[in-house]
Amino acid sequence: MRRDPEPSDGGIHPLLAGRFSPYRFDPSAAVDDETLGLLLEAARWAPSAGNSQPWGFFAARPGEPDHERVVRHLAPSSARWATDAGLLVVTSTRRHVDDTELRYSEFADYDLGQAIAHMTLQAEALGLASHQFRAFDMEGLTKELSPNPGWAIVSMIALGKAVGEPPEGRDRRSVAELLSAPWASP
Ligand SMILES: Cc1cc2nc3c(=O)[nH]c(=O)nc-3n(C[C@H](O)[C@H](O)[C@H](O)COP(=O)(O)O)c2cc1C
């Protein structure tokens, strides 16, 4: 069940206030082709430095051969919940020009993050939850999917129907601290 926005959410949009990273997904809730298409379309329309769009994805759903290729590289901690999600997305960014050390864009990871924010918010709008994670065997998955030169896998996202309530301890730093923490006192 999704959480209703509360006054403590500061009046932000319900799609943002209701979002959380679930530790349980409904294994019977499939993600259909239309939904997958909308998630990718949302990512496609994210802003990026110089419109470089340095993002790429590998998507796999339970029952598809590609799903097993991804699942076998999950860490035990993420396998517990990510395997049940209706969709697994491997995210990648283009950091380098071909196989040189030349930067493609210094904002590649920043831009990928924005594309994922678009995708995960679109998921919320479709009644789906998402849980981003790094708990997988990066080396093994990179060998498995063999990204093109210049591309690097960054993270994974489990998307699907959340089961249960938001986990405890989802505290956030205060707005005042966001404004003050980075700066030396005058
Ligand atoms: C880049 C990234 C990596 C993450 N890696 C993991 C992970 O390996 N395992 C995990 O359980 N959650 C992971 N998370 C989820 C965060 O722990 C979670 O977003 C954070 O605790 C805030 O909780 P909320 O998303 O419910 O607001 C990751 C999130 C991001 C954005």
Image: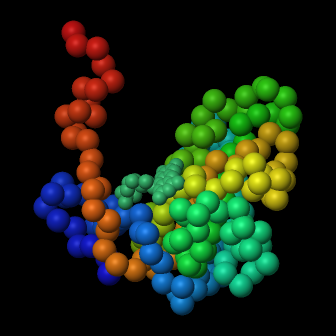
Residue 166 relative to residue 174: left or right:
right
Residue 44 in sight: no
Residue 101: image location, x then y, percent: 79, 26
Residue 64 relative to residue 17: left or right:
right
Residue shown at the point (53%, 71%) measured from the top left: 80
Residue 140 in sight: yes
Front-lying residue, 112 or 158: 158
Residue shown at the point (20%, 58%) measured from the top left: 9
- Counting the numbered discs, the total is 0
Q: Quadrant of the N terminus?
A: bottom left
Q: Quadrant of ligand 1?
A: bottom left
Front-lying residue, 131 or 68: 68
Which color scheme does this rendered protein use?
rainbow
Residue 165: image location, x then y, percent: 31, 74
Residue shown at the point (28%, 34%) measured from the top left: 178
Residue 84: image location, x then y, percent: 56, 78
Residue 4 relative to residue 128: left or right:
left
Image quadrant where residue 181 sits? top left
Residue 37: image location, x then y, percent: 64, 73
Instruction: State whether residue 87 is above or below residue 29.
Output: above
Instruction: State whether residue 120 is above or below residue 4.
Output: above
> Residue lying furthest top in this view?
186
